[in-house]
Image: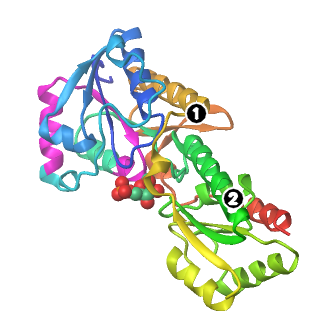
Amino acid sequence: MAKEIRTIGVMTSGGDSPGMNAAIRAVARACSYYNVKCIGFYRGYQGMIENDYCEMNARSVRNIISTGGTILKSARSSEFRTPEGRKKAADNLKKAGVDAMVLIGGDGTFKGGQVFSEEYDIPVIGVPGTIDNDIAGTNFTIGYDTALNTVVEAIDKIRDTASSHDRLFFIEVMGRDAGFIALNSGVGAGAEEILIPEEDLGLDRMLESLKRSKRSGKSSSIVVVSEGDKIGKNVYELADYVTENMPDYDVRVTVLGHMQRGGSPTCFDRTLASRLCVKAVELLLDGEKNVMVGLINNEIVATNFDDGLKEDHSINKELLRISDILSV
Ligand code: F6P
């Protein structure tokens, strides 16, 4: 029989994302609703190793649903990758009386959770929180929608100045190994070209397309480049390459960087975080363990970590086609 769950721990790990606070709030409030003690660990796995935690209740998460960042802070712990680090964490959870954990983060967080739960008998549930949207076990990760809106707003502003000065802008967006942010913000902001890691379209094709745009009467252009783009050059090299081959164009580069990870979460991300985390707590109380929760076809679904982490990032190729058609 599954052990009774009296105390649930929660932490946020990896790159922070807007909506993580809404997620922490939902865990703490669901625990309070079901009369379970809730403990929040600071700085993800590192806080578990250092026994750095606080007790949480329904009131300790007041007024955080609208805030970006994470009140529990976040980190990428190299110590947790070692057996010694994981042992310290397991010992500390035992001492604090933690029966189960909700892990909010991305693929690195889930991989750590999977190894940990195989080594120690502590049930864990993963909640996908990352702006990258690169987790197979959910259609949307917490923070992705907010990041998209941040990026589109920034590109709209750059479009104003690009158009005033007849310039070509390369705009680099986040997404280490996945082009979701680039592809969707690119279509949403009407970019002329979108470069993503999943598709190596080649430099010549990009150059030809920019020349075609210019011939068709466009005086300014926007190229959205995912930081993980596989075309083989970074965004500054791309800009230099175009300058060499299209000397008439005045080229500029903007790297949006970490602004994409901040800001107040959209309603979509707040609701997603709330739904996923209530479900995470309920699954633990029902004796479920070692799965992630995700939103699939508008249902909250539990998927085992292996399937949830599959490298099928299912980029919507249709969006590339749409972008091609609309950037004539
Ligand atoms: O995984 C989220 C993410 O924002 C990626 O898109 C980006 O490559 C990475 O984190 C940057 O990480 P950091 O600056 O925190 O090391």
Question: Is 86 covered by the magenta stretch?
Answer: yes
Q: Nearer the viewer, residue 183 or 33?
A: 183
Which residue corresponds to the image point at 42% horizontal and 18% vertical from the top-left?
63
Q: Nearer the viewer, residue 261 or 9?
A: 261
- Residue 319 located left or right of residue 175: right
Q: Which quadrant of the rendered structure holds the N terminus?
A: top left
Amino acid type at mark 1: Thr
Amino acid type at mark 2: Arg
Q: Which quadrant of the rendered structure holds the C terminus?
A: bottom right
Q: Is residue 280 above or below residue 261?
A: above
Task: Work out whether mark 1 precedes mark 2 in sequence or the reverse, and give the earlier one.
Answer: 2
Q: Position of residue 15 (x, y in %)?
A: 38, 49
Which residue corresponds to the image point at 47% horizontal and 22% vertical from the top-left?
278
Residue 266, which numbered label? 1
Q: Is residue 263 above or below residue 35?
A: below
Which residue corresponds to the image point at 71% horizontal and 54% vertical from the top-left?
189
Residue 159, which numbered label? 2
Q: Secondary structure at mark 1?
A: loop
Q: Position of residue 321 (x, y in %)?
A: 80, 65
How packed mark 2 is, by other alpha carbons closer than 10 Å (few <14, some 14-19, many 20 or more), is many
Question: Is 100 covered by the magenta stretch?
Answer: yes
How packed mark 1 is, by other alpha carbons closer than 10 Å (few <14, some 14-19, many 20 or more), is many
- Evaluate whether residue 110 shows in this view: yes
Q: Which region is colored magenta?
A: 85-111
Q: Position of residue 89 (x, y in %)?
A: 17, 40
